[in-house]
Image (spheres, rainbow, N blue to C red):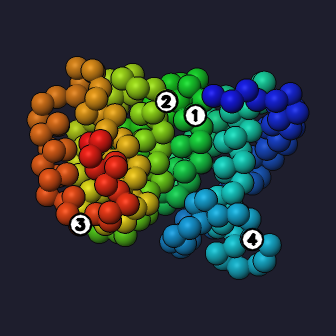
Amino acid sequence: ACETSEAARASAACLVAFLSSTWGALTPPCHQLLCAAPVARDACKGKPIYEFSDEALQVNILALLRCAARAANDAPSGGADLAGQLLLFVAAGCREGQLAGLYALSLLASNAAHARSQLLPALEGICQAAMSHAQAGRPPEQLVPFLELTSALAAGLGDDFFQAAPLSALVRLSAMALASGEQDILRPVLMLLQRLLMSRSAAVTAPMVEEVIQAVLANFHRWPRSMSPQMFKV
């Protein structure tokens, strides 16, 4: 990982201090606005929009969550508390069917301490929210933040992730996602499955591997050619 500069750490510390002091006032309206309507497709990674509209408010809230995650990762102190508050906020949205905030948690996953102490214990509830989302027949592209989060955790924690994760639910959700032909969905799920198939964790069982292989063989002909490298790796 790249070394965080002194200036970046100082900036993160200032942002953590500000957000920590205002979080209680910020989060209720942000939660209400974020859960009021479906989030636009590109909003999770969108740059702030300087206009007044429902879409702009949602994009800006998600941008704030990403800034909070980066600050929590880089700050020399106070980052763990902010990461915990961010997780609580995003989890509350997940319980109401809004998964967009999970992309901010995928940024937290690059910090091993946050990944182990904050995200892994909450993963089962997040998986349940994603499963409810999928079973309700909602658009599959709305699962992308969840897939980004699980892929980032698998990349950062390796076998420790697969040992602790609710793998049965994760494999079922991944198999559902493989039916998509969209790159934004396929890229993180194939990265996750590649690591799962290479894992030495005893939690990864032969039936799970078989389910993954069957899902890949049933769907790969629908995928765009750009996904060929990831497909062959799997």
Residue 90: x percent and y percent?
Answer: 55, 49
Mark 1 lies on a secondary structure that is loop
The answer to the question of whether label 1 and label 4 lie on touching residues, with beta carbons closer than 8 A, is no
| Residue at numbered disc 4 | 49
Per the rendering, the mark at residue 222 is 3
The answer to the question of whether label 2 and label 4 lie on touching residues, with beta carbons closer than 8 A, is no
Closer to the chain start, of discs 3 and 4, is 4
Closer to the chain start, of discs 3 and 1, is 1
Q: Report, in whole angstroms, how far the alpha carbon at label 2 lies from the one at label 4.
A: 31 Å
Label 1 sits on what residue type? Ser
Q: Nearer the viewer, residue 89 or 230?
A: 230
Label 3 sits on what residue type? Arg
| Residue at numbered disc 1 | 110
Q: Nearer the viewer, residue 93 or 213?
A: 213
Closer to the chain start, of discs 3 and 2, is 2
Per the rendering, the mark at residue 58 is none
In this rendering, would 225 be left or right of 64? left
Q: Which quadrant is the N terminus positioned in?
A: top right
The residue that appears at 71% across and 44% down in the rendered structure is 68
The answer to the question of whether label 1 and label 2 lie on touching residues, with beta carbons closer than 8 A, is yes
Q: Nearer the viewer, residue 145 or 58?
A: 145
Q: Report, in whole angstroms, how far the alpha carbon at label 3 lies from the one at label 4.
A: 35 Å
